Image (tube, rainbow, N blue to C red):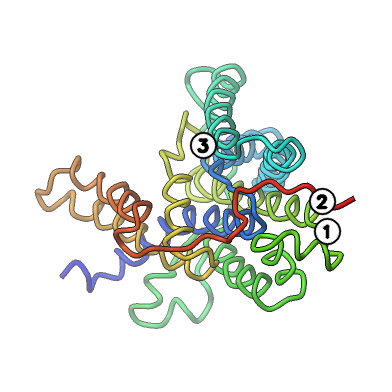
Amino acid sequence: MIFSNPEIWALTLSMAIPLALPAVGGTFSERTGVVNIAMEGIMLIGAFFGVAFSYWTGSAWIGLLAAIICGALTALALAWGAIHVSADQTVLGMGINVFAAGLTTFLLNTLFGYSGTPVNTPKLPSFSIPGLDAIPYIGIIFRNQSVLMYIGIVLVFLAHWFLFSTRIGLRMRSVGENPLAADTLGIPVWRLRYFGVVLSGVFSAIGGAYLSIGVLNGFTSNMTSGRGYIALAAMIFGKWTPLGSFGAALIFGFSTALGIVLQGHGVSSNILQMIPYALTILALTGLIGRSTPPAADGIPYEPRR
């Protein structure tokens, strides 16, 4: 039976993490009131600069740090346009996605040539947790996984705790629900919105770096393949909560893993590749269950003077 094979669940985890991280990042942004559909572009930025700095410095950890910084700077540009300029947040996010796709392809061809990034580019280590790998069935699922997978799982739970169990998390959610009331109480609406959007950039960039220096050690043009948009659906399906987004990402990750496994069982690969995108459409249209966004999500706010 396919479903009793632990390999498919290991693959599910591997496929879910690059969806869960940007989905959690988007949750921070939208919980503070800024619509973020730029996860796809920020993932590309993180993926490319993660590989580039990993190759230039010889350290994948420095590459990861560079990916985080570049993702945060890209998100900062989104925050400035959405918060200070009150630009249309959907158009702004799509603009960043298009810009990132073009920029990373241009830099890839300019800096590394059409042969792509060097094959000797360092990647982040993969390992098995001592003791856990000895547990039957469970050990196979977590055996020789990327260090970013373990970090990603920890970040998801920390994000949920931070957003729903801390004072600053409560304040972030308040500016996404009723910024006027929050401002009246002296809560810095703009500052918290900037913070939420930059956090979304950090998480999305780590998701991109997971693809380029976590699982692989290279970058290809548009290598995210729409994962940022699937992450957007996971965020909505997860009702704008980190744990809910992670659960949704696992569903999408399983659909991708199932498609890969079933390719060897005579099922058309074209049909199988449609599964995660079909689920994305169903989630965004509300057919899998309607979700209500934060009340002030996407609505610009001018602080009281």
- Label 2: state its secondary structure: loop
Farthest residue toward the left?
266
Residue at 53% x, 28% y is: 98
Farthest residue toward the right?
305
Q: From the viewer's perspective, is 277 left or right of 22? A: left
- Give the percent coordinates (x, y) of residue 106: 56, 19
Residue at 60% x, 22% y is: 107
Mark nearer the N terminus (2 vs 3):
3
Residue at 42% x, 53% y is: 233
| Amino acid type for the residue under numbered disc 3 | Gly
| Amino acid type for the residue under numbered disc 2 | Pro
Circle number at residue 303: 2
Is 84 or 122 nearer to us in this picture? 84
Mark nearer the N terminus (1 vs 3):
1
Q: Which-is-in-front pick, marks 2 and 3?
A: 2
Residue 58: in sight, yes or no? no
> What separation in Å lies between label 1 and label 3 (alpha carbons)?
41 Å
Residue 127: in sight, yes or no? yes
Residue at 23% x, 55% y is: 261
Q: Can you say whether 118 is above or below 289 in the image?
A: above
Q: Which-is-in-front pick, marks 1 and 2?
A: 2
> What separation in Å lies between label 2 and label 3 (alpha carbons)?
44 Å
